[in-house]
Image (cartoon, helix red, strand yellow):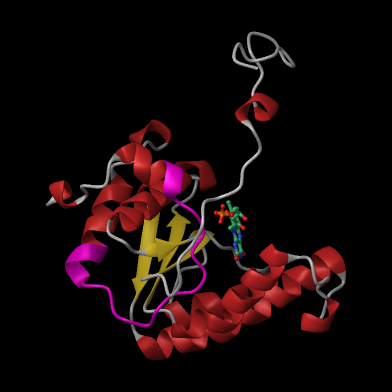
Amino acid sequence: MNADRLTMPLGEAMFTQRSIRKLRPDPIPTEDLRLLLEAAVKAPNGGNHQTGRFLVVTDHERIREFGALYREAWWAKRRDDHGWSGPQDIPPGEKNYNAAMELADAMKDVPCVVFALTVPPGGANSVIPACQNLMLAAHALGIGSLPTTLHATVMDRFRALFGIPKEMVFHFCIPLGYPAVKYGPSRRKPVSETTSWNRWGGAVPWA
Ligand SMILES: Cc1cc2nc3c(=O)[nH]c(=O)nc-3n(C[C@H](O)[C@H](O)[C@H](O)COP(=O)(O)O)c2cc1C
């Protein structure tokens, strides 16, 4: 596999990665998708049992049908968490929720969606490192992505749409596409706030 096509320096890939929610509909070459999957399977996983599985969807019609389910799932989660049932309920300052809502509307038009699942007893922690490898490799090729989830209310229809067996455990839905707009840097808390040194609550030496 042509891993040397991933020429973006690792530091740049990690430090500039962020959620890309506005994606162009242009198709992603199959060999590029393959490279992402090859990067994904190289990730650490519990006991090297390799229980992670990926379902890659590029078929427009299925993505269109999935988009409707994703939108329904997104709003079901907002109803559960906040009692919101429509755009009018999202407080104006909530940039993240507004962007995520727009993705819920736009999911139907993305060129590719990758679903991350595991074969039991493998759990989320055996496929999440692979998802991050996949998203970093995508970023290195100029392909935007982000991890998203679904909601119980759509799971039976989701499984039926793609013929996913009942025993498979779903973890992430990762839309992929070339970014439609320029994105600024991600915003994160200072590491001194999120890290303890030597004992819980111990200050980091650079604080
Ligand atoms: C477990 C998990 C679930 C997420 N679910 C969603 C989602 O359903 N919809 C969405 O738009 N973003 C989702 N995200 C992306 C986060 O919102 C995003 O990583 C975070 O806001 C940081 O933004 P940034 O990547 O642009 O810096 C999810 C991320 C994680 C790790």
Residue 198: % across, % down: 64, 8
- Residue at 61% over, 78% down: 102
In this picture, residue 6 sits left or right of residue 195: left
The vertical placement of 185 against 197, above or below, is: below
In the image, residue 17 lies in the stretch drawn in magenta: yes
Q: Is residue 154 above or below residue 36?
A: below
At which x and y percent is residue 146? 49, 60
Q: Main secondary structure of the magenta part?
A: loop
Q: Is residue 49 visible?
A: no
Q: Nearer the viewer, residue 151 or 206?
A: 206
- The residue depicted at 60 percent of the width and 73 percent of the height is 155
- Judging depth in this view, the residue of 84 and 154 nearest the camera is 84
| Residue occupying the point 26% across, 47% down | 8
- Residue 120 among magenta residues: no
Image quarter for ligand 1 equals bottom right
Decide if residue 140 is on the left or right side of residue 115.
left
Residue 105, given in percent of the width and then of the height, sits at: 59, 83
Residue at the extreme right of the image, as rendered: 83
Residue 144 picture location, percent across and down:
40, 64
Q: Which residues are magenta?
A: 15-33
Query: How many marks on residues?
Result: 0
Query: From this viewpoint, which residue is outermost toward the bottom?
Result: 61
In the depicted view, which residue is nearer to us: 119 or 17?
17
Please state which of residues 143 and 38 is positioned toward the viewer in this rendering. 143
Instruction: Say if residue 88 shows up in the picture.
Output: yes
